[in-house]
Image (cartoon, grey):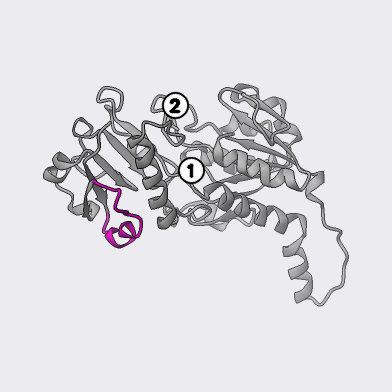
């Protein structure tokens, strides 16, 4: 693949210049995404950005690189295979960031922090021993790069970590990985269920009433994609005790509408999609690493399988 002209969706020239060395021979054009024209797209061999511009035309491109880990906004466009366009995504510290996010909420729960804060307001001295991570069982949906990093982080503390994936292929740091269709065999033993799933045809609405029926007073954390969860089924599972609490960094409609009942539930924590915010410097570094591999015909570890959606 020969890449000459690279269109960057965003006014990021300053940060790109920090990474452009004398060995970089490509031409760059930096345009705000809402100002990208058909002429810009006609000029480009490659497109870089967080989202596709309007008039996005895959027939004119050879390579698209997403600044994000998730690429469902790009895959909503048809023609990837027909036009033989390579799609790559950013790989950086997303896994570490998401692991720390999950760890913070799980430790807050196991250490009874809210309970002790309430006791302090009442000036009460009541002991309630913390629960150790080694005594917890966590089921992680999604065993890719991010899911594996979550498993690695919790395994360090001796936590029992199990995985769920489409293939059921065994992965490092998981005691066992099962297929999505076999998830019911391990969910009843889970203290925590963490979803790191991307949004694909197979994962859309995966967390429905049938799947939630196999939870056994578990807590649920979603750091994947909001549309993988049927929110009505989630609320029902919270009401009937299948789920004891939920931490949602992603929801189906973002921002979460004012009228959503999720806002006012004491057993739900909402955060505004911040568990793994893209660090632009890391994203640009990943882009240039990918460009180098393309020029040298090396394998692309961050290449998206468009038929799978990740």
Q: Residues within 10 Å of mark 1 (few under 14, many from 20)?
A: many
Counting residues from the start of the chain, the first of labels 1 and 2 encountered is: 1
Name the spot of residue 10 as percent of width and height, x first.
27, 55
Name the spot of residue 270 as percent of width and height, x first.
54, 55
Q: Residues within 10 Å of mark 2 (few under 14, many from 20)?
A: few
Q: Residue at coordinates 67% horizontally, 53% vertically from top-left?
A: 103
Callout 1–callout 2 Cβ contact below 8 Å? no
In the image, 44: left or right of 221? left
Give the number of the mark in front: 1 or 2: 2
Residue pushed farthest left? 39
Q: CA distance from mark 1 to mark 2?
A: 18 Å
Q: Residue at coordinates 82% horizontally, 53% vertically from top-left?
A: 131
Q: Which residue is mark 2?
A: 308
Picture layout, residue 213 above or below residue 112: above
Name the spot of residue 116 as percent of width and height, x first.
78, 67
Q: Residue at coordinates 35% horizontally, 55% vertically from top-left?
A: 19
Quadrant of res 218: top right
Name the spot of residue 94 as percent of width and height, x first.
52, 49
Q: Which residue is mark 1?
A: 226
Is the stretch drawn in magenta largely helix, strand or loop? Answer: loop
Q: Which residues are magenta?
A: 10-25
Work out which quarter of the rendered image holds the C terminus and state it. top left
Picture layout, residue 118 above or below residue 217: below
């Amino acid at each position: 693949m020969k890449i000459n002209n690279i269109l960057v969706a965003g006014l990021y020239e300053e940060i790109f210049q920090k990474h452009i060395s004398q060995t970089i021979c490509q031409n760059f054009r930096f345009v705000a995404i809402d100002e990208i024209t058909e002429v810009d797209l006609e000029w480009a061999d490659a497109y870089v950005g967080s989202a596709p511009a309007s008039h996005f035309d895959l027939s004119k491109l050879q390579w698209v690189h997403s600044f994000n880990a998730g690429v469902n906004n790009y895959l909503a466009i048809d023609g990837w295979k027909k036009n033989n366009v390579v799609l790559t995504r950013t790989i950086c510290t997303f896994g570490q960031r998401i692991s720390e996010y999950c760890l913070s909420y799980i430790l807050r729960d196991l250490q009874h922090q809210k309970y002790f804060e309430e006791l302090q307001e009442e000036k009460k001295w009541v002991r309630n021993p913390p629960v150790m991570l080694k005594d917890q069982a966590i089921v992680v949906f999604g065993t890719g790069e991010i899911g594996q990093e979550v498993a690695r982080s919790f395994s360090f503390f001796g936590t029992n970590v199990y995985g769920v994936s489409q293939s059921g292929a065994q992965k490092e740091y998981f005691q066992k990985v099962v297929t999505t269709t076999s998830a019911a065999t391990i969910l009843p033993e889970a203290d925590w269920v963490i979803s790191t799933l991307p949004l694909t045809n197979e994962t859309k609405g995966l967390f429905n009433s049938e799947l939630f029926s196999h939870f056994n007073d578990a807590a649920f954390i979603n750091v994947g994609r909001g549309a993988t969860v049927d929110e009505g089924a989630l609320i029902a599972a919270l009401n009937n005790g299948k789920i004891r609490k939920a931490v949602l960094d992603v929801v189906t409609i973002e921002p979460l509408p004012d009228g959503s009942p999720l806002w006012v539930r004491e057993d739900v924590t909402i955060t505004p999609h911040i568990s793994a915010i893209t660090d632009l410097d890391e994203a640009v570094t990943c882009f240039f690493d990918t460009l180098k591999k393309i020029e040298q015909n090396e394998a692309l570890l961050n290449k998206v399988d468009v038929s799978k959606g990740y």
